[in-house]
Image (cartoon, rainbow, N blue to C red):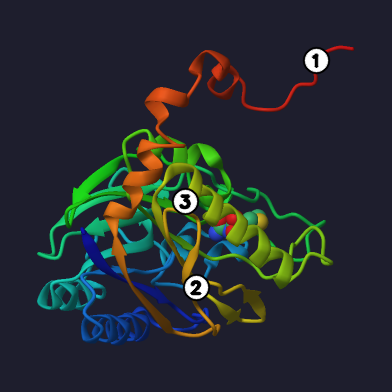
Amino acid sequence: MREIVTAALQMGPIQKAESRKDVVDRMIALLDQAKAAGATLAVFPELAFTTFFPRWYMEDPAEVDTWFETEIPSAETKPLFDRAREHGIGMYVGYAEKTQDGQQFNTSILTAPTGEIIGKYRKVHLPGHSEFDTERDFQHLEKRYFEPGDLGFPVWHSQGGVMGMCICNDRRWPETYRVMGLQGVEMVMLGYNTPAVNSQMSSEGPEDRLFHHRLSVQSGAYQNATWVIAVAKAGDEDGFPLIGGSLIVDPNGKIMAESKTLGDEILVHSCDLDLCTFGKETIFDFARHRRIEHYGLITERTGAEVPPE
Ligand code: CDT
C-alpha cells in the first residue's frame, strides 16, 4: 500500500470585503484540523485567498491588482505556508498570479511536506468572456483577467506518488486528465468556484451543476485510473451562490467522501495509490489499447466542423 492521508479543505464563501488575513486565518484553522486527522496532503480551492473576483467587471488596473499575488508566499499568506511546514503537510493552493512582467494567470501550486514549492500549474481552460455581457444574469470575466496557462499539464513526484494539478473548468475536459494520465498520474488535485446557476440559462440550477461536476470528476478518475481530489469554494458570495460538493474520488470513479455543507469543511481519506495499478494495467493500459492513429483531430482541430453531406 502507498497511502497518502489526504484532506480536501472546502472553504465557505469569501465576501468581497473580507481581508486576506481573515481568509488565511480560516485556512490555518482548516490545516490544523487536517493535521489532527493525520493528513500529509491538504487541497484548497481555486482562488483560495479571495472572493471569486472574476464575477466583478473592473476597468481600473489598480483595482484589478488588489486581487493578485505578486509573490508567493507574500507577507500576508506566509503564515499559512509556515503552518503547513510545521505540520509536515503538503498543499495544493489556488491563487491569482501576477508575474514580474505583468502576466496574469489563474494558478495553483503544490508544496512538499517540507514546505518547498515543488510545482506550479496555470489554468488552461478559461471559461467565460472578456467584456461586460448584458445577456448574462451575472458576469464570468476570467478571459478578461487571465491569460491561458502556458505550462501545460505536468506531473510531479511527491509523497511517493505521481501528482497532477488542474483548476475548475479544466475538470470538464477529458484532455486535461488524459495528458496527465499519459504521464502515469496517480492523484489529480483541483480546486473550483462553480456558480450554482448557469448565468446564460437560469433553469440550470445547483442539482444540474452538481451532476455535471460529479460526472466530470468521476469519469476523469475512472478513465485514467487515478485518484481525483476536487475542492470547492462554496456558498453565497455577496449574493452569488457557488456549489459545494467537494469530492474524493478513487481510481474506479467511486466517491469516497463528499462534503455536506456550503461552509468551511474538511474531508479526509487515506488514498492508496496502489489502487491505481489494476486499471492502469488492464482496461486502461494505454500502451496496449490506445489507437493514436485515429486521434489526430484532437490536436489538429479546435472547434467542431460537420463534414459536408
Ligand atoms: N471557475 C470556473 O472555472 N468556473 C466554471 C464556470 C463555468 S460557467 C462560465 C466551471 O467550470 O465551474
Tag 3 secondary structure: helix
Rounded to the nearest angstrom, the CA distance separating label 2 from label 1 is 42 Å
Residue 202 located left or right of residue 164: right
Closer to the camera: disc 1 or disc 3?
3
Rounded to the nearest angstrom, the CA distance separating label 2 from label 3 is 21 Å
Q: Residues within 10 Å of mark 2 (few under 14, many from 20)?
A: many
Give the x, y percent position of residue 281: 35, 37
Pick whichever, 24 or 252, lies toward us: 252
Closer to the camera: disc 2 or disc 1?
1
Tag 2 secondary structure: loop
Decide if residue 180 is in sight here: no
Q: Are marks 1 and 3 in contact (CB under 8 Å)?
A: no
Q: Which residue is mark 1?
A: 307
* Quadrant position of the C terminus in the picture: top right
Q: Residues within 10 Å of mark 3 (few under 14, many from 20)?
A: many
- Among numbered discs 1 and 3, the one appearing first in the sequence: 3
Q: Give above or below for 131 relative to 239.
A: above
User: Label for residue 233?
Assistant: 2
Taking the view exactly as shown, the residue that stands out farthest to the right is: 309
Rounded to the nearest angstrom, the CA distance separating label 1 from label 3 is 32 Å
